[in-house]
């Protein structure tokens, strides 16, 4: 089997460009004035949203990255899941996808075929169609999707709507980057990275959340920082739920390339919090769960709904008046 990860410098969402550098770069862009552009660069979110009429809006996103696993089919499923999840994070449903691919010419075409086939199956599972794409030559393999979905104009979930008094929830545990980098049993991480956020979004939709984003390359703390800053609130995290093996990897000194960049982007108040917990919070996630902010009085009903559907849900904190992100989590063995 071709060792895909041997052809990369770093894979998955850990390959994301620095969030701090992105912010600096985007300062030079003047937001487009368009009445029907519901979500664009001001502020940026998980996807762009364009209103077609009073009942329909388009959700448009793209995401691609180098391999983080060696198995081609697994890589295709993970890459597709990660891109499709941006549509679910906006409250939408995927409709159509196109492949974005870059591969060395010497890579066997059978390997490429496995990647494409697995991605197509995942798009179909999400309710959409993989209808084509574009492939170029590159020494480092990369794959992902551009995805178009639909959402009701009044049903868009921004990351900028968190309010004081909200409770915070997470729909997947953390640590995919740490677990993969540790080179041990990664089965739980792979299962999570190939699980679409469709079921979680369906369970969440009736509760009308104030803010939602998916946790990917900037880690929990980075995405919480974005939510707090853009909502004008303070986020307090009292739990950092970890995948099996993630804390152990962190204690052993394992870190991914995204760790340093995420710490620079999103400093948090964390007096007395163990370093292994911080490492999990800063770990770059690939195809991570939804970070949800909704009124605290809906918490019990939300937890009951997720439990009845057999879905993971962790209450991880709260939203207060103020600014910044504070972490009070203690290590859980």
Image: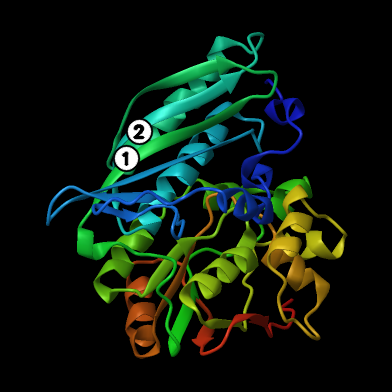
Where residue 66 appears, as percent x and y from the top left, is 64, 33
Position of residue 130 relative to residue 33, above or below, is: above
Quarter of image, res 112:
top right
Asked whether the beta carbons under mark 1 and mark 2 sit within 8 Å of each other, the answer is: yes
Name the residue that disc number 1 marks: 148
Position of residue 219 relative to residue 98, above or below, is: below
In front: 131, or 235? 235
Position of residue 223 relative to residue 271, above or below, is: above
Where residue 213 appears, as percent x and y from the top left, is 46, 62
Local crowd size for mark 2, using a 10 Å CA cut-off: few (<14), some (14–19), many (≥20): many
Position of residue 2 relative to residue 59, above or below, is: above
Q: Quadrant of the C terminus?
A: bottom right
Please report the residue visible at 35 percent of the width from the left and 33 percent of the height from the top. Answer: 97
In front: 265, or 94? 265
> Can residue 174 be seen at all in this image of the molecule?
no
In the image: residue 117, left or right of residue 76: left
Local crowd size for mark 1, using a 10 Å CA cut-off: few (<14), some (14–19), many (≥20): many
Q: Quadrant of the N terminus?
A: top right
Q: Which of the two labelled residues, at mark 1 and mark 2, occupies the earlier sequence position? A: 2
Kindly state the secondary structure of the residue where label 1 is placed.
Answer: strand
In front: 27, or 312? 27
In the image: residue 207, left or right of residue 119: left
Name the residue that disc number 2 marks: 97
Kindly state the secondary structure of the residue where label 2 is placed.
Answer: strand
Please report the residue visible at 69 percent of the width from the left and 59 percent of the height from the top. Answer: 283
In the image: residue 18, left or right of residue 46: right
Disc marking residue 75:
none
């Amino acid at each position: 089997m071709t060792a895909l990860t041997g052809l990369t410098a770093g894979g998955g969402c850990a390959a994301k460009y620095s969030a701090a550098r992105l912010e600096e770069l985007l300062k030079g862009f003047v937001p487009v004035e368009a009445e029907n552009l519901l979500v664009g660069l001001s502020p940026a979110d998980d996807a762009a949203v364009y209103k077609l009429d009073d009942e329909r809006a388009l959700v448009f996103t793209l995401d691609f990255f180098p391999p983080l696993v060696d198995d081609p089919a697994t890589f295709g499923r993970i890459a597709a899941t990660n891109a499709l999840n941006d549509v679910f994070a906006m409250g939408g449903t995927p409709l159509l996808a196109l492949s974005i691919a870059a591969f060395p010419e010497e890579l066997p075409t059978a390997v490429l075929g496995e990647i494409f086939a697995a991605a197509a199956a995942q798009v179909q599972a999400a309710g959409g169609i993989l209808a084509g794409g574009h492939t170029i030559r590159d020494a480092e393999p990369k794959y992902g999707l551009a995805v178009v979905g639909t959402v009701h104009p009044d049903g868009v979930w921004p990351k900028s709507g968190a309010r004081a008094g909200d409770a915070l929830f997470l729909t997947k545990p953390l640590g995919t980057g740490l677990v993969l980098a540790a080179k041990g049993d990664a089965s739980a991480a792979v299962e999570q990275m190939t699980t679409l956020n469709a079921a979680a979004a369906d369970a969440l939709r009736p509760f009308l959340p104030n803010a939602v984003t998916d946790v990917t390359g900037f880690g929990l703390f980075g995405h919480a920082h974005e939510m707090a800053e853009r909502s004008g609130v303070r986020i307090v995290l009292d739990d950092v739920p970890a995948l099996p093996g993630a804390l152990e990897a962190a204690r052993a000194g394992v870190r991914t390339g995204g760790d340093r960049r995420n710490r620079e982007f999103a400093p948090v108040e964390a007096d007395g919090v163990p370093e292994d917990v911080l490492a999990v919070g800063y770990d770059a996630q690939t195809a991570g769960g939804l970070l949800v902010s909704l009124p605290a009085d809906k918490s019990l009903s939300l937890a009951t709904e997720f439990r009845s559907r057999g879905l993971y849900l962790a209450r991880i904190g709260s939203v207060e008046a103020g600014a910044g992100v504070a972490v009070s989590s203690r290590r859980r063995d």
